[in-house]
Image (cartoon, rainbow, N blue to C red):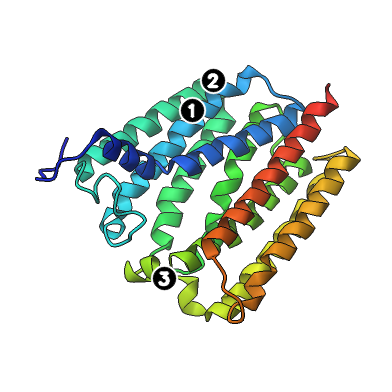
Amino acid sequence: MMVENSQTYKFEDYMSALASMTKFKITIAVCTTTLAGFILARHGLDWSISIPAFALFLVASGSAVLNHFQEHQFDAQMGRTKARMISAGLMSPMAVLGIALVLVFLGMSILYTTAGTNPALLGLLALIWYNGIYTPMKRVSAYAVVPGGIIGVIPPLIGWNIGGGHLADPTILSFCFFIFMWQVPHFWLLAMHYRNDYEGAGFPSVTQQFDEESLGRIVYSWILATVASSLLIPLYGGMENPTGILTIAFLGVWIATLQFKLCRIGTVAVNFKRAFMELNGYALAIMIIISIDQLIRTS
């Protein structure tokens, strides 16, 4: 259903708005951590994870679209979100809600059918936590990302469980702890980059709680804690190859050195978007190295 609008939109506009509405990059990241959890459990990779991973992609996309429906009034006030479907006048709110419900229903049905009860319940938990708890909490607390970080640990747990792993195993819990720790500085760097957007839309933000110099030091402390948490993964059996373990230690030193600029805000210019991308690259590199370590065990 289209919203009446005199402006003419191109096909590319719809594709861009759809990618923004479904948070495509984030939903791909959900699939990536799901695969990492599966590889940790199986010490390998096979096609049995493909359909459940696709199902989780649908659930995550539906959750993102539902979030767009929930926050479309605020999206219109922020430069980075005003191109989404409702904000741009490409679809009505009810049409977007319908898409969200269809994506969630399809994803949950496929996940339950192909992976079983536990993965489906975990997928449902992620949906409830994101849309029912975290999304409303963002309107009242600048620290919503901390409990919200639970959402990020659910996809690797799903992958691990599909791979045959027990949910209380310290191997997957150490990996999930790393993912949890990474999410906080990841989001706060984004908040620092888009501070005018968040504050202008009325979202409580850590940028309102601390001056920029203090917040930079706090974020850097979380990054150091994230580096420390990565070393728990080999300690609890997530890695065995000495080269891989040395590599993640080296990466920890690299990111800690690179991000030290956050402690020098006021004396040096800091590009928060670049720092955000560097931290994401570090987390992705850790996941790739862990996966390679698991894959070479069976080669």
Do residues under tags 2 and 1 come within 8 Å of each other at their CB atoms? Answer: yes
* Residue with the mark numbered 2: 114
Counting from the top left corner in percent of width and height, residue 131 is at 41, 49
Quarter occupied by residue 85? top left
Image position of 141 with respect to 115: above or below: below
Q: Position of residue 84 (x, y in %)?
A: 30, 47
The residue under label 3 is: 204
Identity of the residue drawn at 86% across and 48% down: 246
Mark with earlier residue (3, 1): 1
Q: In the image, what residue occupies the spot 66% across and 68% down?
A: 220
Where residue 3 appears, as percent x and y from the top left, is 14, 42
Give the left or right position of residue 140, taking residue 234 as reference: left
Q: Amino acid at mark 1?
A: Ala
Q: Marks 2 and 1, Cα distance to the nearest angstrom?
A: 9 Å
Residue for point 62% across, 39% down = 33
Q: Is residue 288 left or right of residue 194?
A: right
- Secondary structure state at the residue bearing disc 1: helix
Tell me if residue 167 can be seen: yes
Residue holding disc 1: 55
Q: Amino acid at mark 2?
A: Thr
**Coordinates of residue 126 in the picture (x, y in percent):** 50, 43
Q: Is residue 39 above or below residue 85?
A: above
Judged by depth in the image, the label closer to the viewer, 2 or 1, is 1
- Is disc 2 placed on a helix, strand or loop? helix
Closest to the observer, 275 or 44 = 275
